[in-house]
Image (tube, rainbow, N blue to C red):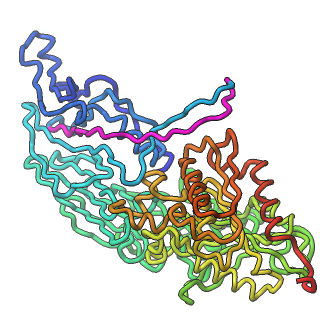
Amino acid sequence: REGQSRRRPPSGPVTSPNGKLQVDVRDHNLVLKTPDASESGDEAAEKVLTTDATADDSFRRSAQRARLLSMQYGMADFPDDLPQGQWSSDSRYLLAFQTTTVPERVVQYVESSPRDQLQPQLQSYPYAKPGDPIPVATPRLFAMPDGREIALSRELFPDPFELRLERWSSDGKYVWMVYNQRGHQVLRLLQVELESGRVRAVIDEQSDTFVHYSAAGKYLLEWIGDETVLWASERSGWNHLYRYNAVTGELINPVTQGSWNFRAIEHVDRDAAVIWFRAVGVMPEQDPYHEHLCRVNFDGSDFQVLTAGDGTHEIEWSPSREYFIDRFSRVDLAPVHELRRSADGALVCLLETGEVTGAVDDLTLSGPRLPQRFVARGRDGQTDIHGIVHWPRDFDPAKKYPVLENIYAGPHDFHVPKTFRTRYGTQSMTEAGFVVVQIDGMGTAWRSKAFHDVCYRNLRDGGFPDRIAWIRALGQQYPQLDLDRVGIYGGSAGGQNAMAALLWHNDFYRVAVADCGCHDNRMDKLWWNEQWMGVVGDGQHYIGNSNTENAHLLAGKLMLVVGEMDRNVDPATTTQVVGKLIAANKDFVFLPIVGAGHGACESPYGQRKRLEFFQQHLGSPASSDSL
């Protein structure tokens, strides 16, 4: 749902669908109005529905709540002067949300060099962090036309991170809400029986680690009928679709199953009861991150993979959806375009095959080089770990080369490129004589649930045992790699990873450049960090994962980079780790970049200083005889 927006509610009182009633907010309480009676001078034109609301617990739409969700979903802020009431389609019921106001954290920083004045400016913005109180929205149900309140038990939604109205039933009997518990171990589809107010969980998703609700495709609730939904779950150890009766809570059937992951719905034909969807890992002989188009019937029958080529597939539908253009590629394969039939994936014709010249793994050749795919076993000796290698274009097999890892181990996704590109952002490094690698280790998403769960309350792991095993295996195959000269760099979550390498794996990584890192997860945005680290509690698991708290463990050469105006990760998290390094009497380089925001090290100046730092401490390629 990232980047999506939600429709703003209308301004002023909210009118019922039949036009006979309105609900408004006065002094933070709900007031029911009868417009027709008001016009005729009837004294019964208004009725106060609630009297217990206050400025700190109001029925006005919460700007504070909107800001919290805006940070997560990229939504535009809602206005704060509108009642949070929603009517059933038959105008017989009103569901309103009463929302608390809590102390709101504000991040402040000094903009040292404003464009419009000489003197510095203090900047600030609201920014909730792990453990902070959050505004809680409590639903209240009213029957019409008399405005009688129907009590709702909160037993099934005791600690919401988010609670929202999902849908009213077409027969006027139920309303459904989605409950996401804070800490993200419980996700429920709740059904409220309107006449009685009874609340029950018709779908109850729970995990001992986390429910990956923040990923499109892992949180999926798709209505395919008045009473039937598709629901995504990792309960089998893989992300799959399930079909439920949303009235009875009955699991009708698993729609997809197997040792692979449902990724996203492409199209649902409700009349034919067919789903077209994207999946990863569905072709066992291919890279498990390759995305393919599939189709399946609602009842789970007639499952088909509709794309075949060895690569990641992107689809463009014909207007009738009878055909689609399948564009697939890999980092070492230029795009191939095919026309296929959507009913069975049959190849109609080959449209175009891209051509590109460039050596991949033949290191005796000179000239342009495509990235090389490489697979090695991870920490358990069984699981395949996938990555790519960027070779210098003038690679000399008679020389020894230092290695750099470009790391980003954010658990929300996988990060190694899978499609063909003309540039990968590593050219300056490879032209300077470094071999650059990118790897997806355990703890990242879209493999098995067990593969992903490694990150739970364990972000410092960063998949490093897998990464190190992978690089060692690469070094065994290519002795030209000098594994005594290994560096690492990354930004944001990758900046956190890069410094962590010199705290907990400094027997392997020698040099690191950490850009705009979240060096203590208590300092970063609430929703992202509580997704993986859970509630703060006594904070011990946050402390154990903190670069800041463990800065005294540093060994090796470290450069810390931060943009003074970073509004994504609080820039103070970098200066705090600087303070801890100074207290521990550690040597390091600190590079704040004036006027820069998040990702400051990707500025031309930052890139140059990063490269020079690696050249200074890792050197350049040298002949085998000289080492």
Question: Picture quarter containing residue 430?
Answer: bottom right
Residue at point 69%, 70% (across, down): 556
Q: Is residue 338 visible?
A: no
Q: Is residue 270 magenta?
A: no
Where the C terminus falls, by quadrant?
bottom right
Q: Is residue 407 visible?
A: yes
Residue at point 50%, 63% (across, down): 549
Give the image location of residue 251, x and y in percent. Answer: 26, 69
Give the image location of residue 437, x and y in percent. Answer: 72, 71
Residue at point 64%, 83% (across, down): 469
Give the image location of residue 398, x and y in percent. Answer: 92, 83
Which of the pair 297/260 is nearer the observer?
A: 260
Give the image location of residue 322, x and y in percent. Answer: 55, 59
Q: Is residue 105 magenta?
A: yes
Total numbered labels: 0
Q: Is residue 243 left or right of residue 171?
A: right
Q: Is residue 148 left or right of residue 211?
A: left
Location of residue 350 with respect to 55 vertically, above or below: below
Range shown magenta: 93-117
Residue at point 86%, 64% (across, down): 431
Q: Is residue 512 left or right of residue 524?
A: right
